[in-house]
């Protein structure tokens, strides 16, 4: 192929950004899933009930992954999120105690405590210079110790008025999914138009360069950890709404720490930070939800889900790495040509 013929192909690859690749992959997964469900389960993949199940599966993981996106954009991680999810569900359920009048107080307590935990994570990472992986793992273990010491099982009670959030929908679309997407839009606007959002990309890309450019590198990291913990609390509130009670293991049972990181990476956000998008993360969450739904409908061994998830993650990272290497080579070639 001549250089002239290769040029349009290179331009098309450059125009096709990572988020677009994620949604193309999602479309492929949906088509394959629909074929498998129709062939082996004799069911309609696009039935309202099945669509509702997929969207419901996206809600909780989507909330946690949105917050995790901000942290990873800054070059950090948050492994405390499953414990914050569990603690928030318990604090909300115990505060509400089945009384509709206590719903605002229950929500406020859960979010406030989560914000304090996020603040602690951010200060440890930025002030004590502890790696985000270790810092949030340690904080998560502290919260886990509190949960194990004070709770032996479910506690509290969520009033029916609050359970409405997790049980109702607009047609086949659950209210919880609408809330999750609205919050995703808010975070996307925050990243695009706010100074702190822009600084998150700068800090994650290269903290040293950002510092030399006059960016205060600590506040964006702290804000990201606070928002991440608040979103974990929102996920805990949603789970409490669905279960009707708080549960000390609901977060860890869902594996929201590793799954949220996987969804963020699958959505095209670089694990070392500096590049990514909330909408890519939502696409990654949707891919996981579709795969889980298809395997549940086909009654596949649950342990096989982790195998498939692992294959998808490795394949996605391999594709993104290949695209990054290609882009770097192209930039290097252009610089050499300009000399």
Image (spheres, rainbow, N blue to C red):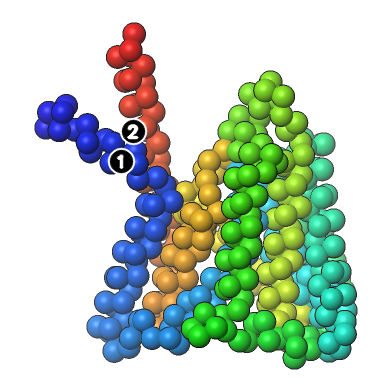
Position of residue 117 in the picture relative to residue 23 (left or right)? right
Circles 1 and 2: CB distance less than 8 Å?
Answer: yes
In the image, residue 157 sits, relative to residue 104, either above or below, namely below
Residue 121 placed where, x, y %?
78, 49
Above or below, 95 relative to 185: below
Picture residue at 39% right of the left edge, 58% below the top: 23
Q: Disc count in the image?
A: 2
Q: Is residue 19 left or right of residue 239?
A: left
| Residue picked out by circle 2 | 326
Residue 28 is marked as none
Nearer the observer: mark 1 or 2; the answer is 1
Mark 1 vs mark 2: which is more N-terminal? 1
Give me the residue at 77% from left, 39% from top. 219
Q: Quadrant of residue 12?
A: top left
Q: Which residue is mark 1?
A: 13
The residue lying furthest to the front in this view is 193
Expressed as whole percent of the image width and height from the top left, the position of residue 231 reads 70, 62
Measured along the vertical axis of the image, is residue 12 above or below residue 167? above
Determine the residue positioned at 45% across, 73% down: 292
- Residue at 62% across / 33% down in the picture? 202
């Amino acid at each position: 192929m001549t250089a002239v013929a290769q040029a349009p192909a290179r331009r098309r690859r450059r125009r096709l950004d990572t988020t677009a690749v994620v949604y193309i992959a999602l479309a492929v997964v949906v088509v394959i899933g629909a074929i498998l469900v129709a062939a082996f389960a004799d069911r309609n993949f696009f039935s309202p009930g099945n669509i509702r199940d997929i969207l419901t599966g996206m809600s909780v993981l989507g909330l946690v992954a949105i917050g995790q996106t901000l942290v990873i954009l800054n070059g950090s991680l948050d492994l405390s999120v499953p414990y914050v999810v569990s603690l928030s569900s318990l604090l909300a359920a115990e505060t509400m105690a089945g009384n509709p009048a206590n719903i605002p107080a229950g929500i406020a307590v859960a979010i406030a405590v989560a914000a304090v935990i996020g603040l602690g994570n951010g200060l440890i990472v930025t002030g004590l210079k502890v790696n985000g992986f270790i810092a949030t793992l340690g904080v998560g273990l502290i919260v886990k110790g509190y949960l194990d010491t004070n709770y032996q099982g479910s506690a509290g009670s969520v009033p029916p008025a609050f359970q409405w959030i997790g049980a109702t929908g607009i047609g086949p679309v659950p209210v919880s999914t609408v809330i999750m997407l609205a919050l995703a839009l808010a975070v996307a606007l925050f990243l695009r138009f706010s100074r702190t959002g822009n600084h998150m990309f700068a800090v994650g890309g290269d903290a040293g360069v950002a510092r030399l450019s006059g960016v205060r590198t600590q506040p964006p990291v702290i804000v990201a950890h606070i928002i991440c913990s608040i979103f974990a609390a929102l996920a805990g509130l949603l789970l409490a709404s669905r279960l009707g009670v708080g549960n000390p293991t609901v977060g860890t049972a869902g594996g929201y720490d590793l799954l949220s990181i996987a969804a963020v990476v699958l959505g095209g956000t670089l694990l070392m930070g500096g590049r990514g998008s909330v909408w890519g993360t939502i696409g990654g969450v949707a891919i996981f939800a579709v795969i889980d739904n298809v395997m549940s409908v086909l009654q596949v061994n649950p342990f096989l889900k982790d195998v498939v998830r692992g294959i998808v993650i490795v394949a996605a990272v391999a594709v993104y790495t290949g695209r990054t290497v290609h882009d770097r080579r192209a930039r290097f070639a252009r610089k050499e040509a300009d000399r």
